[in-house]
Image (cartoon, grey):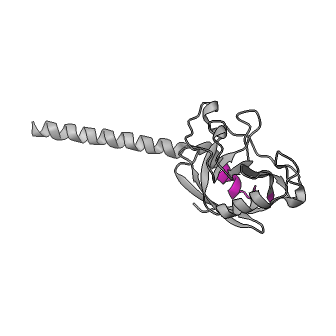
């Protein structure tokens, strides 16, 4: 009887280990990151904004952003659209105003059938897009103030942990050309680099 119980217990243990290994292997096979990641957004003449990115909530957006940052894609790009009390948008144009594009990704937000519980509160970073839900690629925006109407419509994927004073300076002091926040090429804040910390 004891021998039978011991064999049964060993079988259960082996089965649990196999299931556990299978799950781990599945996660390792995924092309997308998981967990929390940290980056530093260095803006010329302003300083560094630190961000925490949530790959458990938005794995596609975070993986894309980190891959682009690691490749140097964002170096020398600018913030071309800034609206005080709303947000600052960048990552799509260089210092001369030439566009720079990356491959589009799936939009991770409720209206596109993806659960995303990050609200567009002050300091949140989110993916910009055109009308097509899956048209986001490299452009992103950082919220200056809360905008609940964006929740479920855009893929938020992290938040500022340090440097909101820089966001305030940029949003409050950058001259704009119109009500849509268009910034003249000469006035656009420049991204020196985005450093991936972990």
When the figure is inspected, residue 187 is found, relative to residue 120, above or below; the finding is: below
Point 34% across, 43% down: residue: 17
* Labels in figure, total: 0
Is 8 on the left-hand or right-hand side of 106? left
> Does residue 160 appear left or right of residue 102 in this picture?
left
Of residues 150 and 98, the one drawn nearer to the viewer in this rendering: 150
Q: Quadrant of the N terminus?
A: top left
Q: Which residues, given as a range, are shown in magenta?
A: 65-77
Horizontal side of residue 17 vs 112, given as left or right: left
67 inside magenta stretch: yes
- Residue 95: image location, x then y, percent: 86, 59
Q: In this view of the protein, can residue 75 be seen by the observer?
A: no
Residue at 72 percent of width and 41 percent of height: 136
Can residue 40 be found in the magenta stretch?
no
| Rendered image quadrant of residue 11 | top left
Q: Is residue 61 visible?
A: yes
Q: Nearer the viewer, residue 79 or 32?
A: 79
In the image, residue 50 sits, relative to residue 146, either above or below, namely: below
How far from the left and from the top, in percent, is residue 143? Answer: 67, 51
Image location of residue 82, percent across then percent down: 78, 52
Residue lying at 72% horizontally and 51% vertically, measured from the top left: 85
| Residue positioned 57% across, 60% down in the render | 198
Q: Position of residue 58 (x, y in %)?
A: 59, 43
Which image quarter: residue 57?
top right
């Amino acid at each position: 009887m004891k021998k039978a119980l011991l064999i049964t217990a060993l079988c259960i243990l082996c089965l649990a280990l196999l299931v556990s290994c299978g799950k781990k292997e599945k996660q390792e096979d995924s092309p997308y990151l998981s967990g929390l990641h940290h980056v530093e957004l260095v803006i010329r003449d302003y300083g560094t904004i630190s961000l925490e990115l949530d790959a458990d909530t938005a794995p596609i957006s975070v993986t894309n952003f980190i891959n682009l940052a690691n490749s140097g894609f964002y170096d020398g790009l600018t913030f071309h659209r800034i609206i005080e009390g709303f947000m600052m948008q960048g990552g799509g144009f260089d210092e001369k105003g030439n566009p720079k594009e990356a491959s589009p990704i799936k939009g991770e937000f409720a209206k596109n059938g993806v659960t995303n519980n990050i609200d567009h509160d002050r300091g949140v970073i989110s993916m910009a897009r055109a009308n097509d839900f899956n048209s986001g690629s490299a452009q992103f925006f950082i919220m200056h103030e809360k905008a609940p109407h964006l929740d479920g419509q855009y893929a938020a994927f992290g938040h500022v942990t340090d440097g909101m004073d820089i966001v305030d300076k940029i949003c409050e002091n950058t001259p704009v050309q119109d009500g849509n926040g268009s910034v003249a090429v000469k006035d656009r804040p420049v991204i020196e680099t985005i450093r991936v910390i972990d």
